[in-house]
Amino acid sequence: MKQLRNLRAKLFTNNRGSVALMTAITMPVFIGMGALAFDVGYAYNIKTEMQQAIDIASLAALKKMKDDNPDPLALYGITTKSALRDLEKDIIKLVNKNAPAVGRNISVKKEDIQFGVWNFSTQKLNTAQNAAGVNAVKITAILNEIRGNALPTFFGSIFRDSLDISVETTAFLPIPPSFHMLSNDAVGAFTTTKGTDIDVASIQVNSNARGALESTLYAKDIGTPYYNITGTINGIKTGRVKEKQPAVADFLQDLPEISTGGRCTRRNFKTRRMFEILRPGIYCGGLKITNVQEVKFLPGTYIIKGGPLLIDKTMKGKNIIGEDVLIYLSGKDAEINAQAGNLYFTGPKTGNHAGVTFFSARGNSAPKKHVFHPPTKLYVHGVFYAPDSDVEFISSRLEGTCRIVCFISKTLLLDKTHVDYLFTHLSAGPDSPLKPIKERLPNPPSLEKKMRPYTIEGVT
């Protein structure tokens, strides 16, 4: 019995040869796993390089779309289908230039490129039905068995001969409104009366009220392809105006306020000379322009505080000119009351407020209302920014140019007023005292950052 127990113990404790046996059994598994890990790592690197290639191509395409587009009605959009086809070719060339060798000339085809409009509310791409208004592109790069271009494996073929790879990116440019009413609850936040003609690239009314838009205009009076109302329309409804659309943020909300400290440059100033020349500074008690032949603002920043910017009826038909000028309306009393005059203003070309001509203070310091009476004419090469003020144009004229955002106010009334922000040169007709402006207007730096193309990557 004792001998039997000893024999059994030896059988269970003697492991000579077992390591070799286990090694022989598991070695193929380890080799296969190592090979698979190598192939997976290789595939991951290829996928990363392909993703970078389509990201670069999508951003470059949108930059070209933005820089080359001459049509202000389309904002950033390509205006012809042939232009889209040319852009497709450019995308494919750029992908092939930056893609890994295994994916060149095979990973992206024309059908893998989609142009459309990015919906900021749903975060989805709406494929364009036509070439106008495009602000987004989606690119998919594919290597798979169905296409016959799957990525071959090196060592993992004991598991699979090839691996499928698919990466995609959607790049888009924000389309902010060129005219934007920010009030979120005002009835008649945007009011247009019969006799008004408005030609601008896009309109956004943030008010969610019933009757957020009060309108008596027909489609022929509205020259804009993007006309969105968060609330509803009271009055004539046309196919161009869309109700119950998502609100849009103030694209200039990061524009820095202007310091109003320091000593007053002028107090209760009133024009006196027939050809008045004004200098930058702080105009305490307001600024009254009256009974002169012409007024010229020298380049710089003008702060109006403690009183209005008043242009009285004696200025009918007279020119008020400011080149490279920013007018900051500081405080509740700094309202614009333009009863007459032809106002020609261009914004500064550099600095934090580049491209801004009028800046009305925000919040509790905001002037309540700015009013332009007949027969005032306002020509602005730049942005009119009054986010917390109501603005009214009554039987007057508003024309100008801008890069992206043109006019922002809390509410806007256009009563028998002609509005045109579509022409590319600020000439305002043959009688304009300004030379036609040929260079592209700069954006404020805070806005320029928002206008860069962005990508959303989706890897499957």
Image (spheres, rainbow, N blue to C red):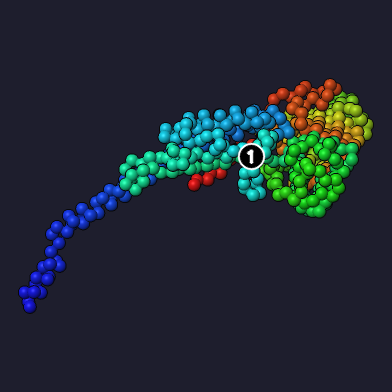
Q: Residue at x 80, y 39 (%)?
A: 304
Farthest residue toward the right?
314
Inspect this view and state whether residue 133 appears.
yes
Residue 324 picture quarter: top right
Percent coordinates x, y for residue 88 in the rendering: 57, 31
Above or below for 417 versus 26: above
Percent coordinates x, y for residue 119 in the rendering: 65, 45
Q: Residue at x 86, y 47 (%)?
A: 235
Residue, disc 1: 116
Q: Residue at x 84, y 21 (%)?
A: 430
Position of the N terminus, as image quadrant, is bottom left
Residue 175 picture quarter: top right
Q: Residue at x 26, y 50 (%)?
A: 28
Inspect this view and state whether residue 302 appears.
no
The one nearer the camera, 307 or 235, is: 235
Q: Residues within 10 Å of mark 1 (few under 14, many from 20)?
A: many
Farthest residue toward the left?
3
The one nearer the camera, 369 or 194, is: 194
Direction from residue 179 to residue 137 in the image, left or right? left
Which secondary structure, mark 1?
A: strand
Percent coordinates x, y for residue 309 in the rendering: 84, 38
Residue 421 picture quarter: top right
